[in-house]
Amino acid sequence: MAVMDILLRVLQPLLLGQMLLYFNTTDVDKSYAYGYAVGVILCSALNVFVIHPYTIGMLHMGMKIRVACCSLIYRKTLKLTKTALGETTIGQAVNLLSNDVNRFDISIIFLHYLWLGPLETIIMTYVMYDIIDVGVSSVIGVAFLLMFIPLQGWLGKKSSELRLKTAIRTDARVRLTNEIISGIQAIKMYTWENPFSALIQKARNAVDAQVGKHMFEECIDKYLRSKTRILVTHQLQYLRDVGRIIVLKDGAIQAEGTYDELGSMGVDFGRLLENQAKTDETSSRPASTTVSRSNSRTSISSLSTVMTNDTSKQEPLEVIRTNFVTLLLTRILFN
C-alpha cells in the first residue's frame, strides 16, 4: 500500500507534465501524448480502486479500536472501588466515551504518514532537483516548507492544551448539573420548596441590587451616553444622575423637573421612601405566607407618594400615597 501511494503521488504529476508539453511544443509525438494521457487516467483509476478501499479498511480498524476502548472503560468502571469512584466523576467517563475515543477513527488513517511523509519528501526533492532539473530552487522551496513543521507542532500543542481545558470545564459542568438535579430531587421529595424559595429570594434581592447598579453605571450611563434614554424605576439612588424627573400618579403627571428643582419645591425623597416602606410593611403583616416576600415588594414599590404643581391645593406629603407609582427618568443628550 505504501509503495502504491508513493508511485501514484510521484508518477501522476510527472505524466501530466509530459502530456502538457505536447500542447506547448511540437517536439512531442502524438502517440506519446496519448500514452501520457492513459497513464494519468490509470493513476486516477488506481487511486479509486486501491486508496479508497484502504481508507475504508483503516476506518473499520479504527472503529474496532474505539469499540474495544469503550468496552475496556466500561468494564473498568464496574471494578472500581468506592474510594476510586469518589475520585472519578461521571463527567470524566462521559468525556472519555464521547470525545476521546473518537480520535481513533481519524488517527488510524494518518498513522502511516509518520514515515511516508519524510520518504515522499526526499523522493520529490530528488525528482525536482535532478530529473526535472529545477536545481537549487527545489531544495530552497522544500526547506521553506519544512520550516512550517515547528509552527505546526506549536499550534498542535496549544490546541491540545485548549482541548484539555475544555474537557476539564465539561467535567465540571456535568458534575454541577448532576448535583443540581440531585438537589432538586431531594427538595421535591421532602417538600422543601417554600423554605428554599425564601432563601433563594433573599439571595436574589442582594444580587438584583448589584446587577441593577452595574447595568445603570456601565450600560445606561456610559455605553448609551450619546443616546436618548428612558428609565422607568422605583429606585431613588438614580435620581441625582438623570437630567429630568417625571413623577406619575394614576397615569397622570404630578411633578416634573430636575432633582434640584423638585428638591426646591419641597419634595423629600428620603421621607417618601421611608413612609412607603412603613406602609407596605404594615399592609403585608396579616398575610403570614407572604412575609418572606415583603422586603422585595418594598424595594419594588419604594416610591408611593407624589406631589402636585398646584401649591394652593397641595396636601401634606405624609398623607399622599398610592399603591403603585411609576417614576419615569429621562435624559436627552445631543451629540
Image (cartoon, helix red, strand yellow):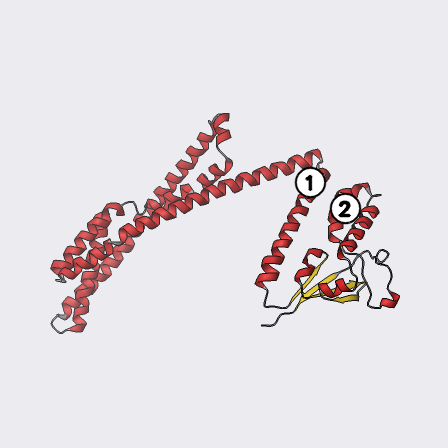
Q: Amino acid at mark 2?
A: Ser
Q: Secondary structure at mark 1?
A: helix
- Residue 112 to residue 267: above or below: above
- Residue 181 to residue 139: above or below: above
Task: Point out the tag, 1 or 2, that comes first from the N-terminus.
Answer: 1
Residue placed most toward the observer, 63 or 193: 193
The picture places residue 134, in percent across and down from the top left corner, at: 14, 62
Mark 1 highlights which residue? Answer: 199
The picture places residue 132, in percent across and down from the top left corner, at: 14, 62
Q: Amino acid at mark 1?
A: Leu
- Can the viewer see residue 34 in this picture? no
Residue placed most toward the observer, 16 or 310: 310
- The picture quadrant where one finds residue 189 is top right
**Distance Cα–Cα, label 1 vs label 2:** 13 Å
The picture places residue 112, in percent across and down from the top left corner, at: 27, 45
- Which image quarter is the C terminus in? bottom right
Q: Which residue is most to the front?
A: 264
Residue placed most toward the observer, 308 or 159: 308
- Horizontal side of 77 relative to 59 (left or right) equals right
Mark 2 highlights which residue? Answer: 294
Count of labels in the image? 2
- Horizontal side of 202 relative to 249 (left or right) equals left
Residue placed most toward the observer, 239 or 113: 239
Label 2 packing within 10 angstroms: few (<14), some (14-19), many (20+): some
Residue drawn at the location 53% of the way across and 41% of the way down = 174
- Horizontal side of 207 relative to 69 (left or right) equals right
The picture places residue 118, in percent across and down from the top left corner, at: 21, 49
Q: Secondary structure at mark 2?
A: helix
- The picture quadrant where one finds residue 307 is bottom right
